[in-house]
Amino acid sequence: MFPNRSLLPFYRHTVTAQCLLTVAFLLLTRSTSAQVTPNYGGNAHQPYLDLLHRTQTENAAPARLGYAWALLASSYQRSGEIEAALRAYGQALPLLAKSVDSRVNYATALDNLGEVYIETGDLKDAERVRQKAFAIRSEIGNPVDLARSHEHLAEILLAEHRYKAAQEDAEAAKVILTSSREPAYSGELQVSQKPGNTLVAAYITLTFAQCKQSAFAACMRSAEMADQLVTRDFAPESLERAHADVALGFATWKNGDTEAADRKFQTGLDRMKTALGETHPVVITSMTLYRDFLKETHQGARADLMSRSIESARAFRMKENCARCILTIAALP
C-alpha cells in the first residue's frame, strides 16, 4: 500500500517558500551590503540566526520579525530538525498573522508547517493548516499560489488514500498552471533563477492517484507528462528528475512492463539518495514503494534486502533526530 507520507516534499524549499526566501535575500543583502560576507563555517542555520538577532535588536515590526522566524524554521525543517522547526514556526505564525501585509507569507509558513506535520505522520493537523493556507490564498486571489495549495492538499489526500479527492485537487492545480505559468524564482540566498515545479508535482500526484484507482492508461499519460516537463526544465541530477523517475517506474509497473519499471525505480532512488541521503523520509518512502514492487514481482531476496535497508534508515533517522533536537532547541533564541 501507499505509505502515509508525502511523496513530494521538495516544494518547501523551492516553490512553496518562494516569498519567504525572496524576502530573506533582500533583508540580508540590505543589512550586510557594506560588510564583508561572513564565513559561517558550515552552519547552515547561522545566517538566519544572525538575521533574527538583527531583526530583534532593531525592534522591527511584527511582519519582519515573523519573516525572520519563518526563515529560521524553514532552515531547521530542511535539515530534519523537527522540534526546532516547530518551535520556530510557533514564534513566526502569530507575528505574521498580525499584519495584513504578511498574509502571503503567513500562508506560505502555514503550508510549510503542514509539511512538518506530514513528516511526523500527523496528517490531520497537516490538512488543517494547509486548508487555512488555502483559504488565505483564495482570498488573495493569486492563481499560482492557489495552484500550489491545491497540489499540497492533494499530497495529504494521497497519503490518506483518498485518491479521488487527491486527483481532483491535482487536476485543479494542473488546470490553473496550464493558463498561468508558474514563474521562476531565486533560490535561498542566491540570485540564479530556477523553474517552478508545481506542475510537475501535480502530474506526479495524478500518476499515483490515477493508478490507485486502476486508471492505468491515464496514470501512464500523467507520468509521461511529468517526465517531459522535467526533461525540459530540470537538470538530470535534480530532485525533480528523481521524483519523475520513481513515478514513471510506478506507472510502468502498473501497466505491465516490470523490467522497465525496475530500471526507473533504481535510477530514481539512486538520484534521491545522492541528493538527500539514504535516511531522508522521501527516500524511505520511495524505498518502501520499490520494496512493494519487488514483493509483487516475486523478487523475495531483493525485497528482504530492501526491507532491511528501510529499517536501518528509519532507526538511524530516529536516533539522529533525537540528538539534533536536543542540541538545536538549546541553541534557539
Image (cartoon, rainbow, N blue to C red):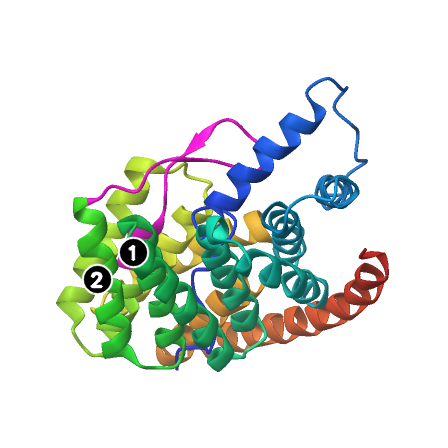
Where the C terminus falls, by quadrant?
bottom right
Compared across the picture, whether 317 is left or right of 220 comes to right
SS assignment at label 1: helix
Q: Earlier in the sequence, mark 1 or mark 2?
A: 1
SS assignment at label 2: helix
Q: Amino acid at mark 2?
A: Ala
Where the N terminus falls, by quadrant?
bottom left
Q: Is residue 97 above or below residue 160?
A: above
Residue 315, position as x, y percentages in the image: 70, 74
Q: Residue at x 52, y 27 (%)?
A: 191
Residue at the disc numbered 2: 172
Mark 1 vs 2: CB contact within 8 A: yes
Q: Residue at x 33, y 54 (%)?
A: 140
Q: Residue at x 68, y 55 (%)?
A: 76
Q: Amino acid at mark 1?
A: Ala
Residue at the disc numbered 1: 147
65 or 69: which is nearer to us? Answer: 65
Give me the disc on residue 333. Answer: none
Q: Which residues are magenta?
A: 180-203
For the residues marked 1 and 2, what is the alpha-carbon distance in whole angstroms? 7 Å
